[in-house]
Image: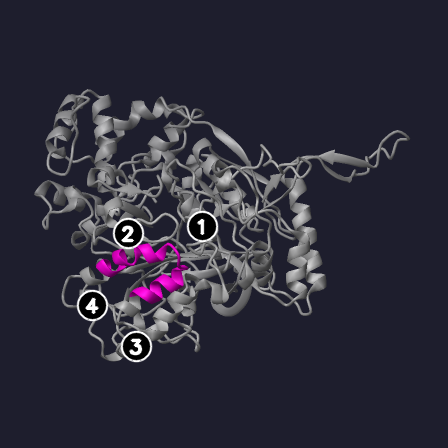
Amino acid sequence: MGAYDAHAPELRLAPFSSAGPTRDGRQKPDLLAPGVNVLGARSAPPEGWGADLPRLTRQSGTSFAAPQVTGTIALMFEAAAQPLDIHTTRRLLLAHTREPHFPPSERPRLGSGLLDVARAVAAVKEGGTAMTRSTVTLPEPEAEPVPHAFERGAEDGWPEREGPEALSPETEDHLLERGASPAATAPIPSAAELLELAEAALPAAAGLAPGAWLARLLSEAGLVEGGQPALAEALKPEHLFAALARGRTVPSNFPYANHFQVIGAPGQNLRVRLRPGDLLVRIAPGEFGLGHLAVIASPHLIHRRDLAGHGLAGESQLPGWYVQVVEGGRFPHPRAHAFARRLLDAEGRLLPYQLLLRPESSGSASRWGVGEAAAGEGLPPCQSEGTENYQVNWWDLRLAPEVLEQTAPPELVRLLNYLGVSYPTFAPHEGRYFQVLTGHLRRHGVLAATESVDRNNFQEVIRDFQRRRGLGQDGLPGEDTLWYLQHDWAASRNLTIARVDADRHPGSEGYDHFCLREDAASAYRALRQEVTGQGGIITSAGGLRSLGAAVTAGRSPTSMHYTGLALDLATDTGMRNPARDPYLITQDGRKWRVWCTSDQAQEVSLDAVVWQNGQTSTRRVQARAFDFTALANQHGFANIGPRQNFPAHYMSAEWWHFQYEAALTPFISQFGIELLSLKMYNETILQCHRNIWDNRKRIFKRQRNGWF
């Protein structure tokens, strides 16, 4: 919600009215309402009304613009001949605004335009829809626009236009007159051909909604029949996502399920190799009708830190793996732009609310088939939905120059054997691993400022450090070597503990605040702001744990809680009664997925896990909820799975546990080093606690005696 000055003749934009993409890429604000010197009723003071205290007051802010939108929606509900769902209400409200006459430089701050109460209410009385939307059209600024995760514009369908106006008459005639060969008998175009068609369609894409652009592309590729009037509607991003995302049932009225192969689902690892011509479908959570389509232009996944070296411009600075795309819309990106979208998180999982599809001719697609990778290319076999996450074959994906070799050097094999992990597990962290290792070696003077270590030379450099410190010279950065590499650095960090707020749920034993390490606290505050903004809550059973806390079946001697990097949701707010719990818990491979209930969220169908008397069961529930785990992951908090003695012991469920792994480096960070990084601890204090001291050198994510 933005604000403008309705008292000014030129209707000035309020100076405090901000704009920008949300964390998940939605461009804000949605619209503007009067928010400067708004006259309203004054709240009654606690001491009562004084004789001279006016009953009215004038205030400014977006908080004073929002009630006018709320009142408008109330009038729309009153005027409607039948109940309005939230999606229809939103479309009608944003489609019937007034066009502002602000400078072009203010365009990103305008949303759909100025709130028009009369037009919105009239649209409802007339039984209208968003088909008659009067789109705000402003001249482009001379400066190069800054692309956001989702570019917003009237032409690219963000938000996507509905009804007949979504297709121009020329486009509709084109689709109806193509007379394409039946898709069932059409040859499947090559990846190069699909990509060429996508680039050729970019000029037309500027005037088409995403569904219509995809309809044209697939029609020209001969994969679908161009004479189907409902084609553009069915191929909207939100419809594709709803029909084909993992765990969804394909609607009976969705006739194009067999035209796409799902090769990547939200929150899962890739299991087939990308190829040019694959489709990236993205939607905005909680806002039906907002979606985006892009065509994969390269099979190579590139880590964010390596984008510049590959000549690519990433859409953001967030960690993870990116891929070059071709896409239309207000700000099109042909291959020449070398533009990359963020596809996977740092753990190699497809981002929430994203879906990867491979266009196929009718009858040749399998919803979960393995496609070209099934022919003995070393990828895991196809698995049923609900089983283990699919693992990516990092060798085949060609992540970055240092990972191109088909066989690892002997030095790296020795390291992997010591860590007890396979290369596919190590690969996503390899660049970061050697970058951090280089930094520590430079601090000790073993490397010059211009020197670094990699998979080929690290053993020789580590031996040099071990020789200087009188350690065994095996060339491996093991527990002792890492301890002495990081000890002085940790003591100099002087990290503090910060108090953060939490929400109390009625009847719960949770706390209203807890403590975290300062970097985790900062990330938590951002997470909580986003969760509460979606109508959810974050309960708490605690964060930082005392070094003297007892070790039990549900408490590890190396728990992240000791370091201030972990938080627990209130343990009695989920897995008890799905009808009342603020959290719904579902199984996600070996881990849990937590869903936060909210009246603002979309309705979802979930198999909620319920624990009772040492046993678990699942209940199919329909609820309004959003994916809390996905949001937590985006802010650096990782979820974990249950302990071995669950479900016999409920406190071993661990569905409530989230730990701030963004602050750690896999295979380098150590339990004791993170404790020494806290200003309040030193070696003398740690030595007073036997369990802590004995485990101080455990390495994060090492499979053999590691720290998790």
Type of residue at label 1? Gly
Classify residue 495 as left or right of residue 94: left
The percent position of residue 539, horizontal first and vertical second, equals 56, 47
Q: Secondary structure at mark 3?
A: loop
Q: Nearer the viewer, residue 196 or 387?
A: 196
Q: Which residue is mark 1?
A: 153
Query: Which image quarter is the N terminus in?
Result: top right
Instruction: Tell me, for residue 325, which label it has, or none.
Output: 2
Q: Measure how far apart labels 2 and 4 are at the Cα level.
A: 18 Å
Q: Secondary structure at mark 2?
A: strand
Q: Which residue is mark 4?
A: 189
Instruction: Tell me, for residue 360, which label it has, or none.
Output: none
Q: Earlier in the sequence, mark 4 or mark 3?
A: 3
> Mark 1 near mark 3, Cβ–Cβ under 8 Å?
no
Identify the main secondary structure in magenta.
Answer: helix
Q: Measure how far apart labels 1 and 2 are at the Cα level.
A: 19 Å
Q: Residues within 10 Å of mark 3 (few under 14, many from 20)?
A: some
Q: Nearer the viewer, residue 632 or 459?
A: 632
440 w.r.t. 604: above or below: above
Query: Magenta stretch?
Result: 195-217
Q: Measure how far apart labels 1 and 3 are at the Cα level.
A: 31 Å
The percent position of residue 266, horizontal first and vertical second, equals 37, 58
Q: Secondary structure at mark 1?
A: loop
Q: Measure how far apart labels 3 and 2 are at the Cα level.
A: 30 Å
> Is residue 215 in the magenta section?
yes
